[in-house]
Image (cartoon, grey):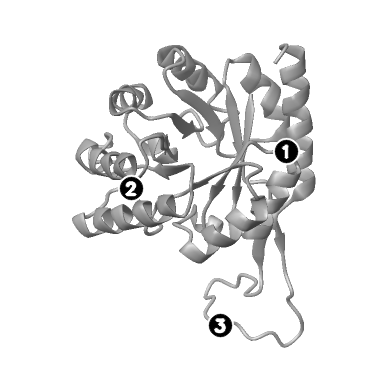
Amino acid sequence: MKLEIAVVSAVGAGAAASEGAHRVELCSSLELGGITPSQGLMEASMEHVDGRLEIHPLIRPRPGDFQYSASDVDTMVHEIRHLLAQGAHGVVVGALTPSGEVDVHAIQRLVDTAKEANPAVQLTFHRAIDQSKDPIAALERLLELGFTRVLTSGHAATAGAGLQTLSDMVERAAGALEIMAGGGLALEDIPAMHAAGLSAVHLSAKKTVSTLGEGTISLGAQDGADPTAYTVTDREVVRAAKAMVNALNLDAGI
């Protein structure tokens, strides 16, 4: 079993590398579900990991749904080209039609762009699959499109709750692509994921920090939220997850 960590900073990527994660999903604005990282963040993250793990940037031009306009897809094409040129090992993409099916037209263009930039590119379909009408039908399309893996909570609010569907997806994929459990995944869920045959788990491993002080002026928050709060990678959570994955792999003779 492999461990992937979602990170939003070069320091977070470096922490994941130091604690033995196999790869990171690099993004910005994790509190919005993640959007495409900047080229500067990609470059800095490459320097921090120094080849110790794979970096897979999220390609998502905006928060919200996964129904993309032609302009959105054009933006993602440019993002893919630039981030792969910087050394990304793969890209994380996803798009749906209004009826909740994989948007094959949009995804095919993104896949073709990525493969033109790097024929050995790894392709991950993100949790848009959990908003699809039928995750098994969506998985069929991803197999046809040549994806490397899919990140999913098993069409449920959390991966723990979606365990049965995750197991069904593993059976259907039959090793042709990797089913990676993620979305509300708790450390205590990892052994069950391993037992169900999942070959990877994905955690945000984040904690919130704040510099809120008396007299802090809000710069736009309208919901009463802490205007100074932001998320960082929690090294201790990464370390605990890695120890658990190592133990499971050892028991399995890996």
- The residue located at (51%, 54%) in the rendering is 27
Q: Which amino acid is tagged 3?
A: Leu
147 lies above or below 229: above
- Quadrant in the rendering for residue 3: top right
Observer-nearest of 132 and 74: 74
- Local crowd at mark 1 within 10 Å, few (<14), some, or many (≥20)? some
Q: CA distance from mark 2 to mark 3?
A: 29 Å
Relative to residue 89, is residue 229 depicted above or below?
below
Residue 115, position as x, y percentages in the image: 32, 39
User: Residue 242 location in percent, x, y?
Assistant: 74, 34
Q: What's the amino acid at mark 1?
A: Gly
- Which residue is tagged 3? 219
Report how far apart the C-alphas of labels 2 and 1 lie in the structure. 32 Å
Q: Which mark is residue 66?
A: 2
Mark 1 or 3: in front is 1
Check the picture and name the quadrant holding the N terminus.
Answer: top right
Residue 210 sits above or below residue 219 on the image: above
**Can the viewer see residue 126?**
yes
105 on left or right of 43 = left
Q: Residues within 10 Å of mark 3 (few under 14, many from 20)?
A: few
Q: Are marks 1 and 3 in contact (CB under 8 Å)?
A: no
Q: Report if residue 8 is visible in the image.
A: no
Residue at 73 percent across and 35 percent down: it is: 241
Can you tell which of label 2 and label 1 is closer to the viewer?
Answer: 1
The residue labelled by disc 1 is 20
Tell me which amino acid carries mark 2. Phe
Q: Dot 3: what SS?
A: loop
- Local packing at callout 2 (Cα closer than 10 Å; few below 14, some 14-19, many 20+) is many
Distance of label 1 from label 3 (alpha carbons): 38 Å
Give the mark, 2 or 1, whose residue is nearer the N terminus: 1
Residue 182 lies, in percent from the top left, at 56, 35
